[in-house]
Amino acid sequence: MIINNIEVFVCCPGRNFVTVKVTTSEGVYGVGDATVNGREQAVVALLEEHVIPCLIGRNAHDIEDIWQYLYRGVYWRKGPINMAATAAIDMALWDIKGKVAGLPVYQLLGGKSRKGVGLYAHANGEDIEQTLDNAQKHAAAGFKAIRLQSAVPGLDVTYGVLGDKKDYFEMQGNRPLPPEETWSTQKYFNMIVELFDRARSRLGNEIQLVHDVHSRLTPIESARLGKLLEPYNLMFLEDASMAENQDNYKLIRQHTTTPLAIGETYNTIWDCKDLIQNQLIDYIRVAATHAGGITALRRITDFAAMFNVKLAPHGAPDLSPICFAAHMHLNTWAPNFGVQEFVGFGDQDLPQIFPHNTEIVDGMAYISDAPGLGVEFDEEAAKAFPYKRSYLPISRLEDGTMWNW
Ligand code: EZ4
Ligand code: CO
């Protein structure tokens, strides 16, 4: 089972996706997601110029050895671009192994730990009322966990709030330079507690609530927010502060029992090692695409289990349905699975380009028994949506100082 071809595709059905296809001597192929939002062509160049030539002729079954070759074997380890390239190859090889075995990938990981995968949906709004209206719609559709984001009065744009853009999947594609947004911690604090206070009054105490701070707070501000939100019993507070310095979370943890989640930008187990082993977090939010694929996430998940940390993979729309499928297999297997972020599958273009087998019923996702990852990439359909240079926004404080977006 020799790797004899690897192709890289970039398409933009509303937003850019980088897809890898690995084909073997037997004609069996696998697909992987290598999308790094705003840096897509960097991953393409790395794959085409430096990674693919080294893999042609290798045995497609040697998933672990190829992973180590691309990690240990490279002097310049880690980093989002490198790990996304590794991740896409890794996903494609798991897809191939499953297809050859005639088994879905979760069976190769150890089988099912649960019937279905719990999801959290996104509710957002231009004001608290609209956020809660949207949350109520998700609750009526059967979701048992919902993320709440609301516009901050006095700020031009707020993270997670779509404004007049109807579809989360179409937020990209027309941003030739990074848009700029303004942040005020003071204004945010004036809104956020009221959002959760009113959410509990309107939605009751059964529903699980999540909020994404998107790393806008310093550790002591996060500690204060966690404390203020304790009465509202959140499932978790996501990305309260940055943790490039993992000790930041010691400070937050000392002050609050609000559960904490982080990890969507992490590239390796080393980015979360101290957070996990010191039990400073409750959910680890790594994405298969950004942290080195299924091989790497399986290792992080097992490590996290030893410290009561649950897997809650990133599920933003800038991860392709191939990454979502990889998560579905990990989530179905992981004994310490927590919850999967879920924003839907977009309009008809996206499911047409990435046909998949996941079924969503009452806020739960069910994997099919299709061999491999159970997701396809339609090269022909993708051709109608060529790459468009695009960026994530940047964030500044009101006086112009650069801040975390
Ligand atoms: O901002 O994926 O939890 N979800 C998030 C996302 C991220 C984007 C950035 O690429 O924080 O919306
Ligand atoms: Co997030």
Image (cartoon, rainbow, N blue to C red):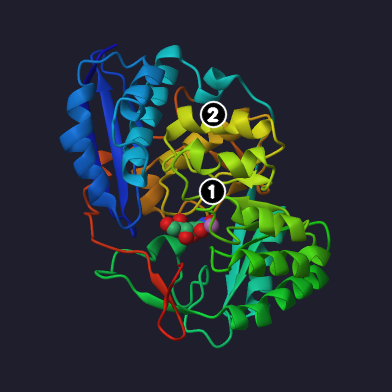
Q: Residue at x 37, y 46 (%)?
A: 80
Q: Dot 1: few (<14), some (14–19), or many (≥20) neighbours within 10 Å?
A: many
Tell me, yes or no, whether the two marked residues, 2 and 1, touch with CB atoms within 8 Å: no
- Eyeballing the image, is 172 above or below 185? above
> Which residue bears the numbered disc 1?
263
Q: Residue at x 16, y 36 (%)?
A: 49
Answer yes or no: is residue 32 visible: yes
Label 1: element kind: loop
Q: Dot 2: few (<14), some (14–19), or many (≥20) neighbours within 10 Å?
A: some
- The spot of residue 249 in percent (x, y) is 64, 54
Mark 2 or 1, nearer chain start: 1
Q: Quadrant of the N terminus?
A: top left
Q: Please name the amino acid that badge 2 sits on.
A: Arg
Label 2: element kind: helix
> Which residue bears the numbered disc 2?
298
Q: Is residue 128 left or right of residue 286?
A: right
Instruction: State the residue in front, 76 or 290.
Output: 76
Instruction: State the residue in front, 200 or 134.
Output: 200
Q: Is residue 283 left or right of residue 171?
A: right
- The spot of residue 26 in percent (x, y) is 26, 13
